[in-house]
Image (tube, rainbow, N blue to C red):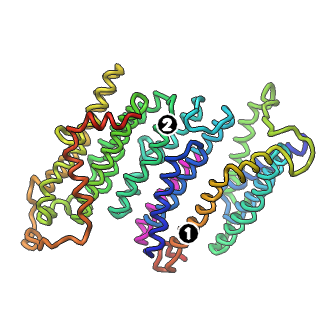
Amino acid sequence: MTYIMSLFLLGLVLGLVAVASNPSPYFAALGLVVVAGMGCGVLVSYGGPFLSLVLFLIYLGGMLVVFAYSAALAAEPYPETWGSRPVAGYMAMYVAGVVLISSKFWEGWHEFSWVPGDELGEFSVFRGDIGGVALMYSAGGGMLVISAWVLLLTLFVVLELTRGLGRGTLRAV
Amino acid sequence: MNPYILATLLFGLGLGTTITFASSHWLLAWMGLEINTLAIIPLMAQHHHPRAVEATTKYFLTQATAAAMLLFASTTNAWLTGQWDIQQMSHPLPITLITLALALKIGLAPVHSWLPEVLQGLDLTTGLILSTWQKLAPFALLLQLQPANSTILIILGLTSTLVGGWGGLNQTQLRKILAYSSIAHLGWMILVLQFSPSLTLLTLLTYLIMTSSTFLVFKLNKSTNINMLATSWAKAPALTALTPLILLSLGGLPPLTGFMPKWLILQELAKQDLAPTATLAAMSALLSLYFYLRLSYAMALTMSPNNLTGMTPWRLQSSQLTLPLAISTMATLLLLPLTPAAVALLTL
């Protein structure tokens, strides 16, 4: 289990480096997919399967897909991928920084400073965060109603900002 | 703007502040702040020109950063202390982070640089909403942060009063002047937060009234820089007579209302044995006073050269609502004798 966890965390950090090194948005979106996927793996092992499922569904399946379509609208002829000079420079810098800082935490008592949500019992959806989910849908019902209303408000805000074609707020639309 | 959309957005503004006021859970407070940010974005960009869009983008980025910092700090607090209650915070790290996040939200120095540029890109009405309504929710949270980090608050307060004074000195655009005035007043509010939160509330409310008057005066005169202000003296002579008094009230001179918060804050600082701090704050108020005086001079104490049609305009009934200006002006000028009542009413 430790091996899989280390793999997930390594993938998470590498994905973050891939996003932060400033490539074109399509490649950065791929980095985000890797980050979200690896992060979900870590969450599942430490008692957060609901959060992991919601992350996949809403973040990757909703928000990232919309972002990918918007990025496709703004396509450029020579996108900068991770092999091009400035991006590769940033990547090397970030990896070097991560290795440098993490070298301070390799030995000693830091090795045991993880705080899991609950013990790894079995690989199921019924884990530590189910209690919180039940609470959210019962006592936190009002907050869910407000959240739904806020999503509707966001829709109106985005529609208001993007209407008008060339005469509107975003002239390039 | 479509009236249904305008109504929805204004409702969203009201709802956001109400949610933050009514919340004892950090997540709900954060939600209220985000609703406020979301709802004001289309209002800021409604005049579809690039300067307004630039201001909207800068506003959105800074407020999103501040809200993310707030969320991070409340999650850290939940991790360290096991609970989400706003009034039960005990660990210094989340408290400091939240103080800095809220300082970014309202525009205290040294994280103030967005405020003049954002305010400059907006029309005067939206600028008024930004300077008044959008400050209420973050202050509701700041007033409840109990064992506050003393050093940070005093540094934020003094830096803000100094930056607000010095920054405003070289400005000719009225909205930027009002932005720096806002920074200076917020500095005074933060300075006394740890000693007497009710004085912070009093300063906030008097600042709200005074800055509303100022924005409404500029809106009625349709002036956005000092030159336009200087040639607007003939448009509404009663207003020309009152505007210097409004500006001097902003500057904190007795016997006007603006003196009330400064007087009480200096008294409280002296009682807490912080005489050098009080002296520095009082001296920095002189810087702000200079540019308020410059505005009064330009508008009312000098008759700027103008052609005949500019000096004798038709004084027709204004199509703008003048009742809010009338009420806020009277409050800006005449509330000083009510100081004991104000202090008694606002005990937190």
Between residue B77 and residue A140, name the one nearer to us: A140
Q: Is residue B338 above or below residue B272?
A: below
* The label number, if any, that marks residue A158 in the structure image: 1
Q: Please name the residue shown 15% across and 56% down the image.
A: B299
Marks 2 & 1 on one chain: no
Alpha-carbon span between mark 2 and mark 1: 33 Å
Judging from the image, what secondary structure is the residue with disc 1 in?
helix
User: Is residue A10 at least partly visible in the picture?
Assistant: no
Compared across the picture, whether A65 is left or right of B131 comes to right
The verdict on residue B83 being magenta is no
Between residue B222 and residue B174, name the one nearer to us: B222
Residue B38 position in % (x across, y down): 52, 60
Name the residue carrying label 2.
Answer: B144
Range of residues picked out in magenta: B44-69
Identify the amino acid type marked 1. Val
Between residue A171 and residue B86, name the one nearer to us: B86
Q: Please name the residue shown 25% across and 55% down the image.
A: B172
Q: Quadrant of the N terminus of chain B?
A: bottom left
* The label number, if any, that marks residue A58 in the structure image: none
The verdict on residue B46 being magenta is yes
Q: Residue furthest top?
A: B273
Identify the amino acid type marked 2. Gln
Between residue B9 and residue B122, name the one nearer to us: B9
